Amino acid sequence: MARSEISTRERIVSAASALFYADGIRGVNVDAVAAKAGVTKRTLYYHFKSKDDLVAAYLAGRDQPNLALFKQWFDEAEGGLPAKVERIFRNLARSARHPKWKGCGFLRTSAELANMPGHPAIRIGAAHKKKFEDWLRVTFEAAGIAEAAQLARQILLLLDGSFAVVLLHRDPSYMETAGHAAHALTKAALPVRKKRQ
């Protein structure tokens, strides 16, 4: 693919990402995306066959950066495994205090497309959540946790539940409370010799 084509495609995805995250999938049409990207609608459709393809590209573009950010927060946190897990929630709560915060783009998109289970964006969102869960499982296994898969799933449920409740109440302290629960669950699951803050 030529350099100009990559640049144009990235510009379209960047514009779509900003608009979809701010206003939702159904609240944004391709005309608005094309205008924000500074391209014609024809150019947009040259790079994306449909709005559905553009929605999928939007979520695919969020996948690795989001996972990398969670891992960075985890790695930079001081303390043992429970504190590191809790730190993800604390940093998300801090992000949720920003006035432009709109929650988890993967969950919001899946809610908008709930009646379209085969939509490519739903598959991308499900894969993203599974990657996060798998990363936690591997991390917990390395720490000697016997029920690593179950704990990873519990932490994922706390995370996604807190996304939903914070959006409803606009109160990031719910995310901090979920983080305390994640800390307690992780600490309780550690082998006796590793139980520490």
Image (spheres, rainbow, N blue to C red):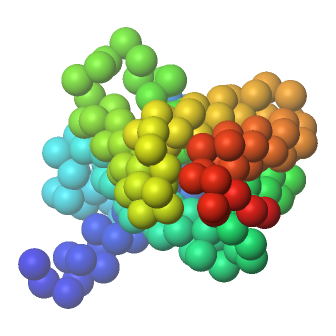
Q: Judge whether residue 19 can be spotted in this image.
A: no
**Number of numbered markers:** 0
Q: Which residue is drawn at the image coordinates 64% and 47% (left, top)?
A: 186
The x and y percentages for residue 153 are: 48, 35
Quadrant location of residue 84?
bottom right
Name the residue furthest bottom.
Answer: 3
The x and y percentages for residue 157 are: 57, 32
Name the residue furthest left.
Answer: 1
Left or right of 169, for residue 159: left
Toward the viewer: 72 or 8? 72
As drawn, 172 above or below 108 = below
Left or right of 122, for residue 161: right
As drawn, 105 above or below 35 = above
Q: Quadrant of the N terminus?
A: bottom left
Q: Which residue is drawn at the image coordinates 20% and 59% (left, top)?
A: 47
Q: Judge whether residue 44 can be spotted in this image.
A: yes
The x and y percentages for residue 107 are: 52, 34
Quadrant location of residue 174?
top right
Q: Quadrant of the C terminus?
A: bottom right
Left or right of 51, for residue 35: right
Name the residue furthest front.
Answer: 193
Toward the viewer: 195 or 88? 195
The x and y percentages for residue 100 are: 76, 53
Toward the viewer: 25 or 158? 158
Q: Which residue is drawn at the image coordinates 21% and 51% (left, top)?
A: 48
Q: Which residue is drawn at the image coordinates 86% and 53% (left, top)?
A: 97
Toward the viewer: 44 or 7? 7
Left or right of 136, for residue 24: right
